[in-house]
Image (cartoon, grey):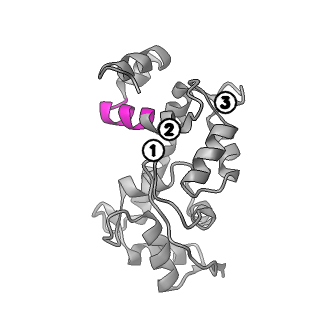
Amino acid sequence: MPANGGGGASRLARVMPPHYLHELPAQDEERLERIFQRLDLDGNGRVDVRDLSAALREVGVHSQYAQKFLARSDRTKSGDISLAEFIHYVREHEKNLRLQFSHLDKNRDGKIDLEELINSFKELGIEISREEATKLLQRMDQDGSLNISFDEWRDFLLYAPSTTLRDIVEYWHHATVRYRSKIHMDKPEHTSHHLKPK
């Protein structure tokens, strides 16, 4: 972390295009820089597959997603990513997550509840029991409300390789039992794997 409060902003100004930085709220700027620094285990200012695999294992996400994440975020194809590349990719990814969240939030109350989740699965032709849906919801639910806010949705799916609901289901199931985040994410509980396409 920078020693002074303005260090993060000045460093981002050096690595991000001015027009893009202007679009980035200060709160998001700080949040994404903190995540990047936690991923950058050796502190060299770059995140490679070893850094990402180790960091994902710590928060219970299967290391297979490290390579997938890098493949999508490494714009220069250098084999690792800079802070600028990380922010650029995550910002675009989060925009897509917002669209998917809005699609699931049928009553537009800013949260996804159990019924909305079950109905979304049904629309895709995926059978899911109420118990299974509850367990999946609890993986994201940080405050015990049994509702998912966008922040909870965004944090859990940060490393998901896709924003389609089918891929999100697969990502859910590849998350392991230990998921209390050091990287601003949620913890899942162990769940059975009986989701079956019709």
**Picture disc at residue 80:** 3
**Is the residue 153 above or below the residue 82 in the image?**
below
> N-terminal of the two: label 3 or label 2?
2
In which quadrant is the C terminus drawn?
A: bottom right
Residue 99 in view in this figure: no
**Is the residue 49 above or below the residue 42 in the image?**
below
Q: CA distance from mark 1 to mark 2?
A: 22 Å
> N-terminal of the two: label 1 or label 2?
2
Q: Would you say 80 lies left or right of 129 here?
A: right
Query: On the image, numbered disc 1 is attached to which residue?
Result: 95
Q: Would you say 151 lies left or right of 35 here?
A: left
Q: Quadrant of residue 175?
A: bottom right
Mark 3, Cα crowd under 10 Å, few <14 / some 14-19 / many 20+, is many
Q: Determine the residue positioned at 48% across, 56% down.
A: 156
Could you say where residue 77 lies in the image, as x and y percent from the top left?
Answer: 71, 28
Residue 125 in view in this figure: yes
Q: Is residue 70 magenta?
A: no
Count of numbered labels shown in the rendering: 3
Residue kind at label 1, given as amino acid type: Lys
Could you say where residue 13 lies in the image, as x and y percent from the top left?
Answer: 41, 17
